Image (cartoon, rainbow, N blue to C red):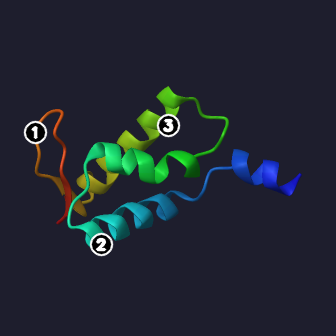
């Protein structure tokens, strides 16, 4: 029962932020596909693929708006780096 609850409950937003920042620092940069793969299975099971894609996009936008990451790529060739 506990495992099922855990898979349906989202982590705190800061958890996702920390994962993204830490991974970018470790690898130098990450593209959107890498970030999707990093977070996909950590997002709650009740989210469908579209909601997961939107969630990841919203997390990236929030980090960008806070000035913590920058996208140095172009449309379709994202390359996220730490500011």
On the rendered structure, is 78 left or right of 41? Answer: left
Judge left or right: residue 49 versus residue 30: right
Q: Could you say whether the residue bearing mark 1 is in a helix, strand or loop? A: loop
Q: Which residue is mark 2?
A: 26
Q: Residue at x 57, y 52 (%)?
A: 42
CA separation in Å, label 1 and label 3: 22 Å
Residue sitting at 80 percent across and 55 percent down? 3
Q: Answer with mark 3 or mark 2, whichever residue precedes in sequence.
A: 2
* Residue furthest right in the image: 1
Q: Is residue 55 left or right of residue 62?
A: right
In the image, which disc is placed on residue 74? 1
Mark 1 or mark 3, which has the lower sequence index? 3
Residue at 10% x, 51% y: name it. Answer: 72
How many C-alpha atoms fall within 10 Å of the one at disc 2: few (<14), some, or many (≥20)?
few
Q: Which mark is residue 52?
A: 3
Tags 1 and 3 touching, CB below 8 Å:
no
Point out residue 14 in the picture as x, y percentages from the top left corner: 48, 63
């Amino acid at each position: 029962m506990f495992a099922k609850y855990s898979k349906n409950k989202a982590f705190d937003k800061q958890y996702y932020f920390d994962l993204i920042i830490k991974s970018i620092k470790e690898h130098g940069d990450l593209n959107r596909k890498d970030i999707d793969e990093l977070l996909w299975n950590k997002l709650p099971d009740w989210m469908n693929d579209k909601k997961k894609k939107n969630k990841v996009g919203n997390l990236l936008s929030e980090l960008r708006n806070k000035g913590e990451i920058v996208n140095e790529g172009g449309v379709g060739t994202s390359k996220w780096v730490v500011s």
